[in-house]
Amino acid sequence: MLRKISDILFPAISSNEKVRIKRSLSLILPISAAASLLYGLFYAWVNPNDWLLWFIFATSAASLVCWLIASKNYLRISALVYVLGLWGIMSISMVATGGMQSVGQGGFLLVIFITGLLLGGRYAFLIMILSIGSTAWIMYLDMLGKIPEIPSQNPFYLWIIFLIYVVIGWVLLSLTMKHLRSALDKASAELEVRRQTEATLSEQAEYLAALHETTLAIIDRLDLNSLLESILVRAEILADTRHGYIDLVLPGGQLTRKHLGHGLFESFTGIVLPIGNGTTSDVLEKGETVVVNNYNTWERRRESYTDQGFYAILGIPLKTQGNVMGVLGLAYEDSERKFTTKRVEQLTQLAELATLVLDNASLYQAAQDELAERTRTENALIESQTRLDLALSAAKMGIWDWEIESDQMIYSERAYQIMGIEKDGLVSSLQDFLKLVHAEDRSKVNQSIDKCLTGAAPGYRIEHRITWKSGEIHWLETQGLAYYNENGKPIRMAGTITDITERKQDEQAIWSANNNLRKYAEVLERRSGLLQLGAEVARAATAILDSRALSQQVVEMVQKQFELYYAGLFLIEEDPHWAILRAATGQEGVKMLSAGHQLEISETSMIGWCITNCQARIALDVGEEAVRFNNPLLPETRSELALPLVSRGEVLGGLTIQSQKPSAFSQEDIATFETMADLLANAILNARLYDQVQRELEEKKRAEDKIRLLNVELESRVRRRTAALQASEEKFRALSENNPLQIARYDRDSHFLYVNHLGNKEKFYAANVLGKTLREVFGSQPSIDFAEEKIRQVFDSGEPLKTEYELMGDVGLWSLAPEFDPRGKVVSVISTTLDITDRKEMEEKLQQRSAELQAANRELEAFSYSVSHDLRAPLRAIDGFTRILMDDFADQIPPDGTIFLQRTRQAAKNMGQLIDDLLRLSRITRVELHRQPVDLHSLSEEIYQQLKAAEPERNIEIHIAKNLKSKGDERLIKVALENLISNAWKFTAKTPGAVIEVNKLTHNGKKTFYVRDNGVGFNMDYVDKLFGAFQRLHSVDEFPGTGIGLAIVKRIIQKHGGQVWAESEPGKGTTFFFTLE
């Protein structure tokens, strides 16, 4: 058990880690000792008798002791002693400097940071737990009052402490970033080495592939042209160029022919040239490889080639039996490319192998042509085979041949070595070979051979494993070609096997190293990002004092730094049961912010859970999490990390970060993000406190500025008034006595503190009443009791009031206002009194006049009724008697008499209509207005239906707009609309295609209604007569009427406080406009 605890607390550390810790200690400890010493000297200057000086100097001494321990290579003990000492000093300093009010709280963050830098996350977590416990105990003592309060500190001293924290934090952060950069540089260097290794292996693979292809060509016994084409192609691939040629020496040795040419040399194919200048001639003369990396400046260049565009050229001799039979040439057209020594060596080896090919082809051809020279040919083949074996041995390659009919396999000696068996220890059959193949690769090998046997492929090239008798696993690259008889039946297969175990091991090592480097780089990048983010949050916290702006910037930094899907910040504000979204990223965040998105503080959401439990929570897959994620605006969220924002024991809200990937967050992320969240919470709380302090300071500054301005103004006024006092005394007395307003100032007991005069009846200087009460001046009377009560009321309530009161026969409008001292206490009441006796008399006269007018209106109504009855009676008699004459005595009346009687009846009817219009006009002026919402569309539609019902034969088109709403007296507005629409109906009677429109528009900023028709219209020269009573612009014969209707419309509109006017043109219709407000 003790061993497990020891392993947990003191895990083994690598030599690299020891170097890192020692380097960090050698930087941190001297800085700590120097900083503590300087701080102690400064503190001794500020508080020379404070016992905390011992702890400050003890910190400096402890740093030096830890430095000495570290110099003895007790690195972890030195670091542990140092951080525990720092933690203890921070705890003691908090108790001694005011507990939770101490500025030393930030020191715990510094200690945790140093612990993580020196000893890693495990110890940093332990120190964090100890710090939380220490601050909790200090908080408990502080709440019990056992920690004495410390007087306000010197602001300069507090600033120096803050500056020290900032400098130390900056130095540590710089050191951390320096270590990270060093690690990243080292990783980059290792990656570069790996990249170069991969490039070398790739180049080696290409080289081996070229050797394999050339070897297969030997086995396949190609003709000369095919061999030369294959050699040139393989050489171009190995040299990474498309420009190459092969020159062959013609019999006699004095001429060469361009046998093959690719790229820039293709146009020279077949050309015969004498041996002279040029690469081929130089190679033939020297018998060795010639490298020219700048052909244009080479003294032996062929002038005919200089215009072809190649820059570097290589010539390699092709020998057979010791004699140069030709030249293999390759060229680069890019001036930046050169033939390196390594590349030349590889191409030379390829040329040597090609020479073997050419020797073999030449010998084979000679054997066919001259059977007599079999012995020489066999010797040459043996020699060629020996050289081939040497080349194959150098390439770790063996040869095999399988006679399909007899199922016999023949292997070269190198092949036995590659397969790890003795030469006579293998039964030479295909199945015996397949038994050696690894079980997982056996089917792949078998399938490749079957494809060749069935003709699906002429050959194969695969990589597979074999198992040696010792149990070792080796990797082979096997190649094979199938040979067929004239019937297409496979008769034999031949090929090579190459041991590629080392290459595979290198590839695996490279892959593992790359994978480890990638993971290490990802960890470094993430840690660097987290540290950078923490630094940016700290920087923003000191630079931005607006909590909402700070929150928005932090969530955007978090999302951008880690390429997250979404980040949001919730704050608890007025309602403690809800967390309100105050910062969010992306378009979804903008939508949620504008919608006032909020979450209930309960365990139904990740944010609510972390705020309720004051603990971070990770959802590796939101679909499987117990606390369900349900936000349709964030459909792509797969994993979420929620953290509470806690500062000084107060939960301010929560931070949520979300990813589109599952399991995007780890426990290590929680510790880092919690540190950032704590920084953010402290910054938000500080910003709130700063806002509060700023508001208080601004209010105080405004008050001071106001007082200063008032003092300046007061002093200026005093000087001015003192200088002009005697000169203006008479003028002031005249103004004061003749001012209609009485201005006075009273104390609580109604003493006059100031007064200009006491009304129109008793005018005298203010000195006569100053210091006296109202009762002493005016005596005891009910109005004085009333005045004293109101003055006391204003003193008690601090609210102004207005009232009327009568004093000594005069009626006054009395206004009282409290006057406050700087503490908000009422010190006096200022009153202004306006004598309204005359106005009261006028109001009484006005009321009397109104009563008389109402009586007159009643008499007028009675008269109107009487006139209406008295005038209608004779008209009815006229109409009745004329109708009797026309009905009963029609045969006795001459035709002219009948016409006269008809005209008499029509005149009586017109007279009756005129009486009705006059009565209606008189009633409108007397009717009381009742304002209410009115729908002019419904009224117009109703009027139109009535007109249509009266004259159904009329073919008229009417347009009544919707939403014609206003306020007014519905009965009167309907009368006005009836007159206007009836006018339009009447004056379009003789217009084909008549159209009436009722609508509204805006005129001079007012809602204006109008009725428009396309009738006869009128001349605008007579528009002034249009709204007068009995005024007509058309004859009665053309259009009947009394001329009263528009006068009624005008009175109704004016009664509503509106205006009415008309626009017209003869023959083009008329438009009547009116407003109701």
Image (tube, helix red, strand yellow):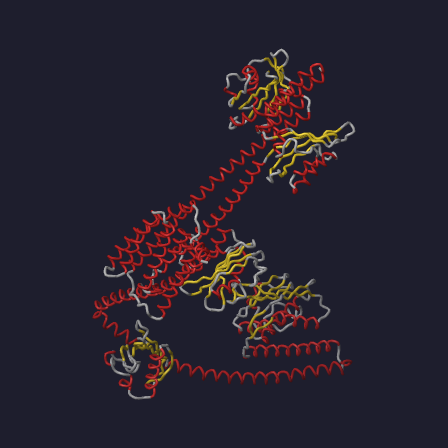
Left or right of residue 808: residue 538: right
The x and y percentages for residue 728 are 23, 70
Total marks in image? 0
User: In front here: 403 or 844?
Assistant: 403
Kindly tell me whether residue 95 is visible in this rendering. yes
Q: Residue furthest front?
A: 424
Q: Quadrant of residue 357?
A: top right
The x and y percentages for residue 246 are 61, 21
Residue drawn at x 72%, y 18% is 368
Residue drawn at x 59%, y 84% is 865
**685, above or below 254, in the image:** below
**218, above or below 925, in the image:** above
Kindly tell me whether residue 30 is visible in this rendering. no
Q: Quadrant of residue 185?
A: top left
User: In front here: 399 or 596?
Assistant: 399
Q: Quadrant of residue 693?
A: bottom left
**224, above or below 709, in the image:** above
